[in-house]
């Protein structure tokens, strides 16, 4: 995205930032896919990118508008990052992995 390879991580830090930005409550996160607006999607991706940079000890000074512009340049990135989000919180398999 944005002409660079960027780390993405969805964990509690990213969710904390997202709920603060979007107004979602913790018990509403399971309904995200049903009622997510475009603004919510950009905020969620922004939080995943910001948290990924933090974990990798990389500087992150991009804005929500920067992320939206990157999505303009690479629309497939929207679905790619949302898939990463879904995989981050999918149930573990039967072997506990």
Image (tube, rainbow, N blue to C red):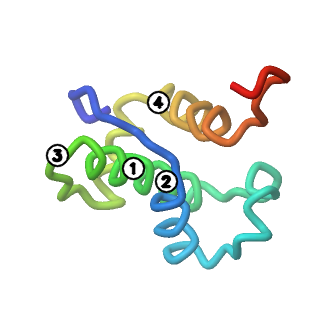
Q: Label 1, on which residue?
A: 68
Q: Label 4, on which residue?
A: 77
Mark closer to the chain start, 2 or 3: 2
Mark closer to the chain start, 3 or 4: 3
Distance between mark 1 and mark 3 Cα atoms: 20 Å
Residue at the spot 52% in from the left edge and 69% down from the top edge:
16
Residue at the spot 52% in from the left edge and 51% down from the top edge:
11
Mark closer to the chain start, 4 or 1: 1
**Residue projecting furthest to the front:** 95
Asked whether the residues under the numbered discs 2 and 4 touch, taking CB atoms below 8 Å apart as contact, a structural biologist would say no
Mark closer to the chain start, 1 or 2: 2
Q: Which SS class for mark 1? A: helix
Q: Label 2, on which residue?
A: 42
Q: Label 3, on which residue?
A: 58
**Residue projecting furthest to the top:** 95
Question: Which sits in the foreground, 46 or 25?
Answer: 25
Residue at the spot 27% in from the left edge and 46% down from the top edge:
53
């Amino acid at each position: 995205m944005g002409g660079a390879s960027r780390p993405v991580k969805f964990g509690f830090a990213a969710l904390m930032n997202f709920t603060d930005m979007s107004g979602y409550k913790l018990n509403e996160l399971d309904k995200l896919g049903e009622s997510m607006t475009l603004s919510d999607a950009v905020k969620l991706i922004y939080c995943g990118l910001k948290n990924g940079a933090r974990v990798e000890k990389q500087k992150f000074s991009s804005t929500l508008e920067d992320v939206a512009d990157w999505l303009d340049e690479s629309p497939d990135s929207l679905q790619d990052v949302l898939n990463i989000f879904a995989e981050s919180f999918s149930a573990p398999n039967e072997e506990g992995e």
